[in-house]
Image (cartoon, grey):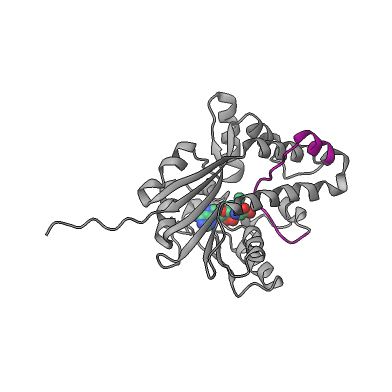
Amino acid sequence: MKIDSPWLKKVAALYDGKRRDFNWRLAADGIIHHHNGLVYGRRSFVARVKKNAAGAEKIIHASETALSRLGFGYLGKPEPGALLLDAGCGRGGSSLLLAAKYPGLAIRGVTVSSYQASAARAAARERGVSGRVRFSRASMLALPFKKSLFSLVWACESTEHVPELRDFFSEMARVARDGARLVVIAWVNNASDALSRGYAAQVDKAYVTKIHREKEYLADGVKSGWELREKADLTGPTAAYWAGRKALKSGSGTESFMAPAFASRALLYRLYAYDLVKRPLAKTAP
Ligand code: SAM
């Protein structure tokens, strides 16, 4: 899907409009996340958020950084000189954390939002990593990269915006090398009754998403060579995170349906780690 398609223009407009927003407010350390957090110990977390108005945002932000760090573990240790694609990079939060963690790693991040791409570039310059960490406005469904370039791919809460997951997996397979590791973290549609279908519909409307079901994450990558190696269910810890956000005096405004959506498991929060197995082309008969 090209960057100027009507659907991607809607997604871009959403992120172009998020500037001095909730995520920006949380990022006192300059790392702007656009993803959920993980909380182990819901009651004390919610109590701390309620009690500690000034520091509450710091606690929420730390729980989001905890998600990034947990996910990085599934990438494995990059080989020296490895190149990672951050597919749907937001304002570069994950890429910048990865660049600090692995000084030998080169990163290319793409987002459909021109504002996000320039904000991420500015952040990379400020941190002195713009030589090896580059961001651009591009669609991860039609990438401006040659084939078999990347040995690692990170897609954190970006596949929700992809209408057909098969298109995502096949483009990732084109630009990735044989043996590449792909880590996807995603909201997954688990709605089974009218109430939970209502939450899922509210989420799709507010975030311009088409949230996929688990079976798509399990099956849609296989044809392009992505073999599922590991899977983690993070729904409980992320439901606790949303419960904390709901206790904030001023959040993003979506907490009223995000908190019950994860608490009721109408939405699941999943991590999938795949490896690319490129098969040789079958020989045609002479
Ligand atoms: N991965 C970042 C993070 O974890 O903070 C950002 C997640 S944000 C919820 C979704 C991101 O996916 C946005 O940056 C958006 O521009 C990007 N995105 C959605 N569809 C895309 C596409 N087809 N190509 C490139 N980026 C896309």
Q: Quadrant of residue 216?
A: top left
Q: Residue at x 53, y 70 (%)?
A: 81
Q: Horizontally, is 221 left or right of 156 in the view?
A: left
Q: Residue at x 20, y 58 (%)?
A: 283
Q: Quadrant of residue 37?
A: top right
- Classify the position of the C terminus by image quarter: bottom left
Magenta stretch mostly in which secondary structure? loop
Residue 134 within the magenta-colored segment of the rendering? no
- Can the viewer see residue 24? yes
> What is the x, y in percent for residue 132?
59, 72
Q: Nearer the viewer, residue 244 or 11?
A: 244
Residue 184 higher or lower than 117, as above or below: above
Q: Nearer the viewer, residue 286 or 120?
A: 286
Quarter containing ligand 1? bottom right
Residue 72 higher or lower than 262, as above or below: below
Q: Residue at x 36, y 56 (%)?
A: 278
- Can the viewer see residue 13? no
Q: Quadrant of residue 49?
A: top right
> What is the x, y in percent for residue 252?
72, 45
Residue lying furthest left in this view?
A: 286
> What is the x, y in percent for residue 133?
60, 69
Q: Horizontally, is 82 left or right of 221 in the view?
A: right
> What is the x, y in percent for residue 242?
71, 39
- Classify the position of the N terminus by image quarter: bottom left
Range of the magenta residues? 29-48
Q: How many marks?
A: 0
Residue 108 higher or lower than 201, as above or below: below
Q: Nearer the viewer, residue 36 or 236?
A: 236
